[in-house]
Amino acid sequence: MPLSLPTASLLAGVLLWACLRLVRSILKKSPLDNIPGPASKSFLKGNFEELANPDTAFAYHRKISDHYGGIIKVHGPFQTTPKVPIFYDVTYKLREAISQLASQGPCEVDLLSWMSRTALELIGQAGLGYSFDPLLVGAPEHPYVESTKMLIPLISRLLFFRQRWLLDILPWKDAHELRDIIDVIYDTSITIYDSKKEAFAAGDGKVTDQVGGGKDILSILMRANMEATTEDKCPESEVIAQMSTLIFSAMDTTANALARVLHLLSENQDAQDKLRAEINKAREEHHGELLFDELISLPYLDAICRETLRLHPPVAFTIREAHADAVLPFSKPVRGIDGNLMENVMIPKGTPLLMSMLSSNTNPELWGPDSYEWKPERWLSSLPETVLGARVPGVYSHLMTFNGGNRACIGFKFSQLEMKVVLCVLIEQFRFSLPEGKKIIWRMNNIAAPSVEGHREPELPLMVELVKKTGNSYKP
């Protein structure tokens, strides 16, 4: 079958670009040539297939970190204020829904779905003043939930074909699904923005009547934008784009981190019992619902969250590009391919840099020989001097989980509070355990996600049962 003109032009352009890259790579020498690293297995994919393969990437990252150390050359293709009442209100709806499911005895529940729905509702109410989901059993998921759940796996499969015009013309089902998902995300942002805009036009009373009472992040942003001078105003298109960033970044990462904690607690029943006892004691001492200061002061809850985010960062790595020539110093000398020790390397402008949060967080030279083990107790005493002295530039607890510098996650405090409120409410009420006959595996998509072995769909089926209080402990 002859190729259409657009498709033929696209293929010709890609082939020409690849040839130019090949000639350049052969003729041009780089100071990075002496950095050791794994050999490329494919001209077309470089090491990227191993680095980003959802099924094997976790093991590959550990393998190359252990073998080559902290500096590795890899080959590319072709080379706010806490809103605790809102958090509790939403989480109590989640608790009621799961209680209904488990009312007749232990049952299997897809916790990833419920964590995603809860995370979307929390950022909806606290961030946008908008309710996405009543969190009722049997209620359909908002289209946004399903869209974001499938967005990352699709992006991973379409790594180099993300332009809108390409998605329209490529004869691939994945490309068209990605296009439709992007439309759902954009249309949702438009709907929320327009409803907020209409409320402002009707007066402040209408705004305060909305979810969040006009104190959500979007209302504050829009009010400030309306009062700004002409040169300081953000165009509507930028505000809408920021909304999509806010919703997406606050949903999938935190939802999947919560799913990871519940999975780990299902595997470690002693840790689950210890956490439940801590929460029970705190609730008794403070006579009910824990306020912000009381919640963040629970040591074992904090240790579980920190250790999970250390060992299992939702985003394992990120890619940056050098905007100027720079000299990168090494924390310790690296032996180059030529056998000589190197204390730094010159990074040419335009060099892509893959920063592994996973490797930094699990570096045995910093965290010790048990760095790959889940041990919440490590946070209940002083951290090793090697960690304290490493000056890791992350914004959170000597970790790179939330990145650092100007590109650090702006919502990491929001995420921590959300995790602690949800865990506090759920662990007190329910016992979580592993289902029989189903092996849960985690895939390194852009955001790590669980699924059942043999299936591709993201899900986390766990057994859930109500627990009852007997004295100072809980029993099924």
Image (cartoon, rainbow, N blue to C red):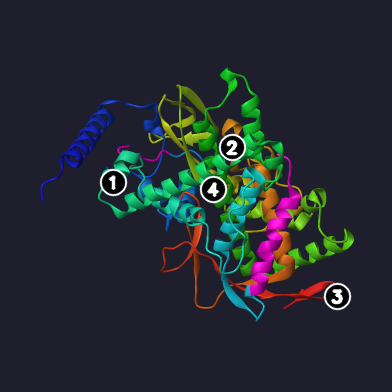
The quadrant of the rendering that contains the C terminus is: bottom right
- Residue 2 in the image: x percent, y percent? 10, 47
Pointer 2 residue: 197
Q: Which residue is mark 1?
A: 42
From the viewer's perspective, is 316 left or right of 75?
right
Query: Helix, strand or loop at disc 1?
Result: loop
Distance from disc 4 to disc 3, alpha carbons, whole Å, reads 41 Å
Q: Residue furthest bottom?
A: 104
Q: CA distance from mark 4 to mark 2?
A: 41 Å
Whether residue 78 sits left or right of residue 288 in the image: it is: left
User: Quadrant location of residue 72?
Assistant: top left
Q: CA distance from mark 2 to mark 3?
A: 53 Å
Comparing 365 with 324, the one in front is: 324
Q: Regarding mark 2 in the picture, which secondary structure is present there?
A: helix
What is the span of residues highlighted in magenta in the rendered image?
73-100
Residue at which label 4 appears: 358
Identify the mark nearer the N-term, 2 or 1: 1
Task: Tell me: residue 49, above or below residue 458.
Answer: above
Name the dominant secondary structure of the magenta segment: helix
